[in-house]
Amino acid sequence: QQCIDAWIQNHSPEIDFSTTDRIRHTVWIVGEIASLEISDAMENVSSMYLADGHHRVASSLILSEKFPHDSAKQHVLTFAVPESELVVRGYHREIIGMPWSPEEWDEAFRRMTEIDHVQRIPNHASPPSDVGIVHVHHAQANWVLHLKEPADQLGRMEVDAAQLQRTFFEPELNIKDPRNDKRLAYIPGTLNSADLRARVMKQPDSVVFELHPVPTRLIKETADRGGYLPPKSTWVEPKLRSGLFIHDIQ
Protein backbone atom coordinates (compact mmCIF):
# COMPACT_ATOMS: atom_id res chain seq x y z
CA GLN A 1 0.00 0.00 0.00
CA GLN A 2 2.87 2.40 0.76
CA CYS A 3 4.35 1.79 -2.68
CA ILE A 4 1.01 2.53 -4.34
CA ASP A 5 0.45 5.66 -2.26
CA ALA A 6 3.93 6.95 -3.08
CA TRP A 7 3.37 6.46 -6.81
CA ILE A 8 0.02 8.24 -6.70
CA GLN A 9 1.48 11.21 -4.82
CA ASN A 10 4.35 11.67 -7.26
CA HIS A 11 2.68 10.99 -10.61
CA SER A 12 -0.26 12.31 -12.57
CA PRO A 13 -3.07 9.91 -13.48
CA GLU A 14 -3.35 8.55 -17.01
CA ILE A 15 -7.16 8.54 -16.85
CA ASP A 16 -9.45 10.71 -14.73
CA PHE A 17 -13.17 11.02 -15.42
CA SER A 18 -16.58 10.96 -13.74
CA THR A 19 -19.61 8.99 -14.92
CA THR A 20 -23.25 10.05 -14.89
CA ASP A 21 -23.79 8.32 -11.54
CA ARG A 22 -21.26 10.77 -10.02
CA ILE A 23 -18.56 8.14 -9.56
CA ARG A 24 -15.01 9.32 -10.25
CA HIS A 25 -12.56 6.89 -11.87
CA THR A 26 -8.86 7.75 -11.63
CA VAL A 27 -6.18 5.44 -13.07
CA TRP A 28 -2.42 5.50 -12.63
CA ILE A 29 -0.19 3.22 -14.70
CA VAL A 30 2.80 2.26 -12.58
CA GLY A 31 6.32 1.92 -13.91
CA GLU A 32 8.36 -1.27 -14.06
CA ILE A 33 10.18 -0.79 -10.74
CA ALA A 34 7.00 0.07 -8.84
CA SER A 35 5.25 -2.84 -10.51
CA LEU A 36 7.92 -5.23 -9.23
CA GLU A 37 7.65 -3.78 -5.73
CA ILE A 38 3.88 -4.27 -5.76
CA SER A 39 4.30 -7.83 -7.05
CA ASP A 40 6.77 -8.60 -4.26
CA ALA A 41 4.39 -7.14 -1.67
CA MET A 42 1.51 -9.23 -2.99
CA GLU A 43 3.58 -12.37 -2.43
CA ASN A 44 3.24 -11.72 1.31
CA VAL A 45 -0.56 -11.68 1.19
CA SER A 46 -1.52 -14.97 2.84
CA SER A 47 -5.07 -15.17 1.49
CA MET A 48 -7.43 -13.38 -0.87
CA TYR A 49 -11.21 -13.72 -1.05
CA LEU A 50 -13.47 -13.48 -4.05
CA ALA A 51 -16.17 -10.91 -3.28
CA ASP A 52 -17.68 -10.52 -6.76
CA GLY A 53 -17.43 -12.01 -10.25
CA HIS A 54 -17.71 -15.66 -9.24
CA HIS A 55 -19.21 -16.76 -12.56
CA ARG A 56 -16.54 -14.96 -14.58
CA VAL A 57 -13.79 -16.61 -12.57
CA ALA A 58 -15.44 -20.02 -12.95
CA SER A 59 -15.70 -19.60 -16.73
CA SER A 60 -12.06 -18.42 -16.87
CA LEU A 61 -11.01 -21.55 -14.99
CA ILE A 62 -12.86 -23.74 -17.50
CA LEU A 63 -11.19 -21.86 -20.35
CA SER A 64 -7.72 -22.28 -18.83
CA GLU A 65 -8.26 -26.03 -18.44
CA LYS A 66 -9.49 -26.32 -22.02
CA PHE A 67 -6.39 -24.53 -23.38
CA PRO A 68 -3.58 -25.46 -20.94
CA HIS A 69 -0.79 -24.37 -23.30
CA ASP A 70 -2.20 -20.93 -24.12
CA SER A 71 -0.55 -18.53 -21.66
CA ALA A 72 -3.08 -15.76 -22.25
CA LYS A 73 -5.86 -18.06 -21.06
CA GLN A 74 -4.06 -19.02 -17.84
CA HIS A 75 -4.75 -15.70 -16.16
CA VAL A 76 -7.76 -13.67 -15.12
CA LEU A 77 -8.08 -9.92 -14.70
CA THR A 78 -8.64 -9.09 -11.03
CA PHE A 79 -9.28 -6.00 -8.94
CA ALA A 80 -7.67 -6.34 -5.51
CA VAL A 81 -9.18 -4.18 -2.75
CA PRO A 82 -7.92 -4.03 0.85
CA GLU A 83 -10.59 -5.09 3.32
CA SER A 84 -10.26 -1.69 5.00
CA GLU A 85 -11.39 0.02 1.77
CA LEU A 86 -14.07 -2.47 0.74
CA VAL A 87 -17.71 -1.43 1.07
CA VAL A 88 -20.27 -4.25 1.24
CA ARG A 89 -23.90 -3.20 0.94
CA GLY A 90 -26.99 -5.31 1.40
CA TYR A 91 -28.71 -7.04 -1.50
CA HIS A 92 -32.46 -7.05 -0.96
CA ARG A 93 -35.15 -9.50 -2.10
CA GLU A 94 -38.42 -8.55 -3.75
CA ILE A 95 -41.29 -11.02 -4.02
CA ILE A 96 -43.41 -10.14 -7.06
CA GLY A 97 -47.02 -11.08 -7.72
CA MET A 98 -48.03 -11.87 -4.12
CA PRO A 99 -51.29 -9.97 -3.47
CA TRP A 100 -51.48 -11.08 0.17
CA SER A 101 -53.04 -8.86 2.79
CA PRO A 102 -50.97 -7.80 5.82
CA GLU A 103 -52.89 -10.34 7.88
CA GLU A 104 -51.89 -13.14 5.50
CA TRP A 105 -48.26 -12.09 5.80
CA ASP A 106 -48.66 -12.05 9.59
CA GLU A 107 -49.75 -15.68 9.49
CA ALA A 108 -46.95 -16.68 7.11
CA PHE A 109 -44.28 -15.10 9.32
CA ARG A 110 -45.65 -16.86 12.39
CA ARG A 111 -45.20 -20.18 10.60
CA MET A 112 -41.46 -19.59 10.14
CA THR A 113 -39.46 -22.25 11.97
CA GLU A 114 -36.34 -20.18 12.69
CA ILE A 115 -37.57 -16.85 13.98
CA ASP A 116 -37.20 -15.38 17.45
CA HIS A 117 -39.55 -12.45 17.08
CA VAL A 118 -41.72 -10.69 14.49
CA GLN A 119 -43.63 -7.46 14.86
CA ARG A 120 -44.98 -4.64 12.77
CA ILE A 121 -42.96 -1.43 12.62
CA PRO A 122 -43.73 2.12 11.44
CA ASN A 123 -42.94 3.31 7.95
CA HIS A 124 -40.15 5.58 9.18
CA ALA A 125 -38.14 2.80 10.87
CA SER A 126 -34.38 2.83 10.26
CA PRO A 127 -32.62 0.08 8.24
CA PRO A 128 -31.83 -3.30 9.86
CA SER A 129 -29.25 -2.68 12.57
CA ASP A 130 -27.44 -6.03 12.42
CA VAL A 131 -27.25 -9.40 10.71
CA GLY A 132 -30.17 -11.61 11.64
CA ILE A 133 -32.57 -8.66 11.47
CA VAL A 134 -34.74 -8.30 8.35
CA HIS A 135 -37.22 -5.53 7.54
CA VAL A 136 -40.17 -6.40 5.32
CA HIS A 137 -41.96 -3.69 3.34
CA HIS A 138 -45.54 -4.04 2.08
CA ALA A 139 -47.79 -1.33 0.65
CA GLN A 140 -49.96 -1.48 3.77
CA ALA A 141 -47.58 -2.61 6.52
CA ASN A 142 -43.96 -3.11 7.56
CA TRP A 143 -42.40 -5.80 9.76
CA VAL A 144 -39.15 -6.59 11.51
CA LEU A 145 -38.05 -10.23 11.62
CA HIS A 146 -35.46 -11.40 14.14
CA LEU A 147 -34.04 -14.60 12.67
CA LYS A 148 -33.09 -17.35 15.08
CA GLU A 149 -29.40 -18.22 15.28
CA PRO A 150 -28.83 -22.00 15.14
CA ALA A 151 -27.98 -23.24 18.63
CA ASP A 152 -25.32 -25.72 17.50
CA GLN A 153 -23.04 -23.17 15.85
CA LEU A 154 -20.52 -20.74 17.31
CA GLY A 155 -21.54 -17.46 15.76
CA ARG A 156 -23.81 -16.88 12.80
CA MET A 157 -22.41 -18.99 9.95
CA GLU A 158 -25.31 -18.60 7.50
CA VAL A 159 -26.10 -15.33 5.78
CA ASP A 160 -29.61 -13.94 6.15
CA ALA A 161 -30.41 -14.47 2.47
CA ALA A 162 -29.64 -18.19 2.76
CA GLN A 163 -31.68 -18.56 5.94
CA LEU A 164 -34.66 -16.76 4.38
CA GLN A 165 -34.48 -18.98 1.31
CA ARG A 166 -34.25 -22.17 3.37
CA THR A 167 -36.85 -21.36 6.02
CA PHE A 168 -39.36 -19.14 4.23
CA PHE A 169 -39.04 -18.58 0.49
CA GLU A 170 -38.91 -22.28 -0.39
CA PRO A 171 -41.28 -23.88 2.15
CA GLU A 172 -43.80 -21.02 2.34
CA LEU A 173 -43.65 -19.41 -1.12
CA ASN A 174 -42.47 -22.46 -3.11
CA ILE A 175 -39.47 -20.60 -4.53
CA LYS A 176 -37.12 -23.53 -5.09
CA ASP A 177 -34.76 -21.95 -7.64
CA PRO A 178 -33.85 -18.46 -6.40
CA ARG A 179 -31.60 -17.84 -9.37
CA ASN A 180 -34.28 -18.31 -12.03
CA ASP A 181 -37.67 -17.93 -10.34
CA LYS A 182 -39.38 -14.92 -11.95
CA ARG A 183 -41.23 -14.09 -8.73
CA LEU A 184 -37.96 -13.24 -6.98
CA ALA A 185 -36.12 -10.05 -7.89
CA TYR A 186 -32.90 -8.63 -6.46
CA ILE A 187 -32.47 -5.00 -5.44
CA PRO A 188 -28.97 -3.56 -4.91
CA GLY A 189 -28.13 -1.99 -1.58
CA THR A 190 -27.60 1.40 -3.21
CA LEU A 191 -31.33 1.95 -2.60
CA ASN A 192 -32.20 3.05 0.93
CA SER A 193 -35.21 2.15 3.08
CA ALA A 194 -37.28 5.05 1.76
CA ASP A 195 -36.60 3.93 -1.82
CA LEU A 196 -37.72 0.39 -0.97
CA ARG A 197 -40.95 1.59 0.64
CA ALA A 198 -41.66 3.82 -2.35
CA ARG A 199 -41.14 0.81 -4.59
CA VAL A 200 -43.82 -1.31 -2.88
CA MET A 201 -46.23 1.62 -2.81
CA LYS A 202 -46.08 1.63 -6.61
CA GLN A 203 -46.41 -2.18 -6.77
CA PRO A 204 -48.98 -3.24 -4.14
CA ASP A 205 -48.68 -6.93 -5.08
CA SER A 206 -44.97 -7.01 -4.16
CA VAL A 207 -43.09 -7.27 -0.87
CA VAL A 208 -39.45 -6.28 -0.25
CA PHE A 209 -37.18 -7.99 2.29
CA GLU A 210 -34.53 -5.46 3.33
CA LEU A 211 -31.33 -7.19 4.48
CA HIS A 212 -28.40 -5.97 6.53
CA PRO A 213 -25.06 -6.06 4.66
CA VAL A 214 -23.07 -9.28 5.03
CA PRO A 215 -19.99 -8.57 7.20
CA THR A 216 -16.65 -9.29 5.54
CA ARG A 217 -15.92 -11.57 8.51
CA LEU A 218 -18.83 -13.80 7.52
CA ILE A 219 -17.78 -13.80 3.86
CA LYS A 220 -14.33 -15.04 4.86
CA GLU A 221 -15.66 -17.61 7.32
CA THR A 222 -18.00 -18.99 4.66
CA ALA A 223 -15.13 -19.34 2.19
CA ASP A 224 -12.77 -20.86 4.76
CA ARG A 225 -15.21 -23.67 5.57
CA GLY A 226 -15.82 -24.41 1.88
CA GLY A 227 -19.27 -22.87 1.77
CA TYR A 228 -20.81 -20.45 -0.67
CA LEU A 229 -23.16 -17.48 -0.60
CA PRO A 230 -26.57 -17.48 -2.31
CA PRO A 231 -26.96 -15.56 -5.59
CA LYS A 232 -26.88 -11.79 -5.13
CA SER A 233 -25.82 -11.79 -1.48
CA THR A 234 -23.50 -8.78 -1.58
CA TRP A 235 -23.31 -5.48 -3.42
CA VAL A 236 -19.60 -4.68 -3.39
CA GLU A 237 -17.99 -1.29 -3.93
CA PRO A 238 -15.86 0.17 -5.38
CA LYS A 239 -16.80 -1.16 -8.82
CA LEU A 240 -14.72 -0.74 -11.95
CA ARG A 241 -16.40 0.74 -15.00
CA SER A 242 -17.04 -1.97 -17.61
CA GLY A 243 -14.48 -1.87 -20.42
CA LEU A 244 -12.01 0.28 -18.52
CA PHE A 245 -9.54 -2.62 -18.23
CA ILE A 246 -9.42 -5.49 -20.72
CA HIS A 247 -7.45 -8.74 -20.63
CA ASP A 248 -6.99 -10.09 -24.17
CA ILE A 249 -7.39 -13.88 -24.21
CA GLN A 250 -7.08 -14.32 -27.98
Image: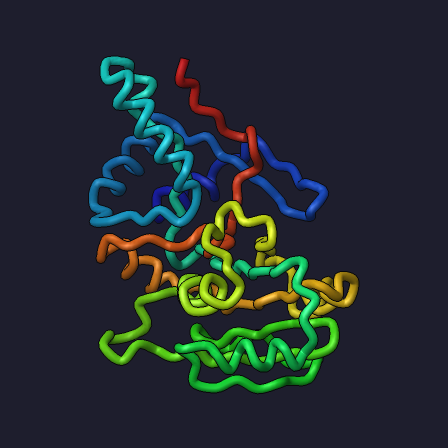
Does residue 38 appear left or right of residue 26 in this picture?
Answer: left
Task: Please tell me which residue lies in front, 25 or 236.
Answer: 236
Question: Which residue is located at x 21 percent, y 40 percent?
Answer: 43
Question: Which residue is located at x 62 percent, y 44 percent?
Answer: 24
Query: In the rendered image of this protein, does residue 219 appear above or below residue 9?
Result: below
Question: Which residue is located at x 47 percent, y 58 percent?
Answer: 88
Task: Please tell me which residue lies in front, 175 or 154.
Answer: 175
Q: Is residue 17 visible?
A: yes
Q: Residue furthest right?
A: 202
On the image, the x and y values in percent for residue 248 come to 43, 18
Task: Please tell me which residue lies in front, 221 or 8.
Answer: 221
Q: Is residue 33 visible?
A: no
Which image quadrant: the C terminus? top left
Does residue 169 appear left or right of residue 199 in this picture?
Answer: left
Rendered image quadrant of residue 34: top left
On the image, the x and y values in percent for residue 96 come to 65, 58
Query: In the rendered image of this protein, does residue 233 appear above or below residue 136?
Result: above
Does residue 36 appear left or right of residue 181 in this picture?
Answer: left
